[in-house]
Image (spheres, helix red, strand yellow):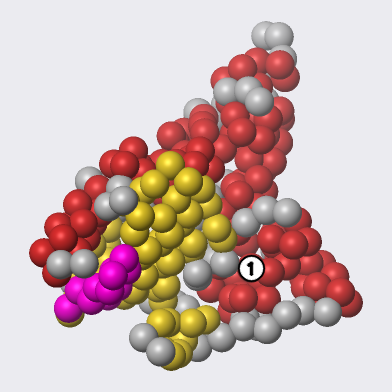
């Protein structure tokens, strides 16, 4: 592959991320293309990837730029990047990562995204020009114990109320590795971190909507109170969990004057 071809593809791909355009990101990928988020150990394709990207762009605003050289093989591209938080000044909230992309017909067949968030203390190593996450498996007993700890942290300690809660933060709170927590959520709950936390937030919001407290809080106030960063993300997550919009849900429980 020519370097100019690789540079052009990376520019288009990062431009889509900088515009916060989920559809434009998908346009860079094959119809059967797979995106692998190595930090959360999640593979996404098709509609599920589009949904995840849309929710991510609603909540987070980063500016991505290439850091260093863009390397290419016959049908592969690899590059490092810096993601700057548009909501912060300087390097606060920024993070670095690396993408390894396999192309087919000029589009991405597979994208493996490796990154380390500012609060992430996990170990990353580079081998044979690939970044690989240091991981190991959990036994069934260890998995059960970790799931119980996760449930306690969310239900009793209510960590989901922290709008900046992340997988590394939860792992540090539980004094275990990011990979273990990710494995527990994926295999034990058949979910991922993002969906798990939103489910707890939606359940807390539903309880507030049912209580008909006086004075009544707006749905926007409730969204922020339970840990959501934006009302639009709250509406999407609430409908996904309950099958209803927050307003319709509240009317079911509203007391007559």
Instruction: Give the position of the N terminus as an image quadrant.
Output: bottom left
Q: Quadrant of the C terminus?
A: top right
**Where residue 137 sits in the image (x, y, percent)?**
73, 80
Q: Would you say residue 28 is visible in this rendering? A: yes
Secondary element under disc 1, as helix, strand or loop, is: helix
Residue 107 appears left or right of 212? left
Query: Which quadrant would residue 4 be assigned to in this image?
Result: bottom left
- Where residue 228 appears, as percent x and y from the top left, is 50, 46
Tell me if 250 is positioned left or right of 43 in this view: right
The correct choice, above or below, for 41 with respect to 141 in the image is above
Q: Is residue 255 left or right of residue 28?
A: right
Q: Which residue is mark 1?
A: 182
Q: Nearer the viewer, residue 59 or 23?
A: 23
Vertical comparison of 111 with 129: above or below: above
Residue 17 visible in this rendered orientation of the protein: no
Q: Image quadrant of residue 6?
A: bottom left
- Residue 163 part of the magenta segment: no
State the residue at coordinates (60%, 70%). Answer: 170
- Neighbour class for label 1 at 10 Å: few (<14), some, many (≥20)? many
Q: Residue at x 68, y 30 (%)?
A: 242
Q: Tell me where residue 115 appears, x and y as whole percent.
A: 40, 73
- Part of the protein shown in magenta: 69-80
Q: Magenta segment, principal secondary structure?
A: strand
Q: Position of residue 56 (x, y in %)?
A: 42, 49
């Amino acid at each position: 592959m020519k370097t100019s071809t690789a540079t052009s593809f990376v520019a288009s791909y990062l431009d889509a991320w900088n515009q916060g355009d989920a559809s434009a990101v998908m346009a860079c990928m094959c119809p059967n293309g797979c995106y692998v988020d190595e930090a959360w150990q999640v593979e996404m394709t098709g509609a599920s990837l589009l949904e995840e990207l849309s929710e991510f762009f609603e909540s987070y605003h980063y500016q991505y730029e290439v850091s260093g050289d863009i390397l290419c093989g016959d049908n592969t591209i690899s590059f490092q990047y810096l993601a700057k938080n548009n909501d912060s000044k300087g390097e606060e909230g920024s993070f670095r990562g690396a993408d390894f992309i396999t192309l087919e017909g000029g589009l991405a067949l597979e994208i493996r995204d490796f990154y380390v968030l500012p609060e992430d203390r996990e170990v990353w190593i580079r081998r044979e020009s690939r970044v690989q996450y240091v991981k190991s498996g959990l036994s069934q007993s260890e998995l059960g114990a970790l799931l119980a700890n996760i449930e306690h942290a969310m239900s009793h300690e209510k960590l989901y109320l922290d709008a900046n809660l992340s997988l590394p933060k939860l792992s540090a709170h539980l004094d275990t590795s990011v990979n273990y927590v990710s494995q527990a959520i994926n295999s034990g709950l058949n979910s991922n971190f993002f969906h798990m936390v939103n489910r707890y937030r939606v359940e807390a919001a539903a309880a507030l909507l049912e209580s008909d407290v006086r004075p009544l809080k707006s749905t926007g106030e409730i969204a922020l109170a339970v840990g959501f960063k934006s009302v639009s993300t709250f509406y999407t997550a609430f409908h996904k969990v309950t099958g209803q919009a927050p307003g319709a849900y509240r009317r079911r429980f509203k007391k007559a004057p």
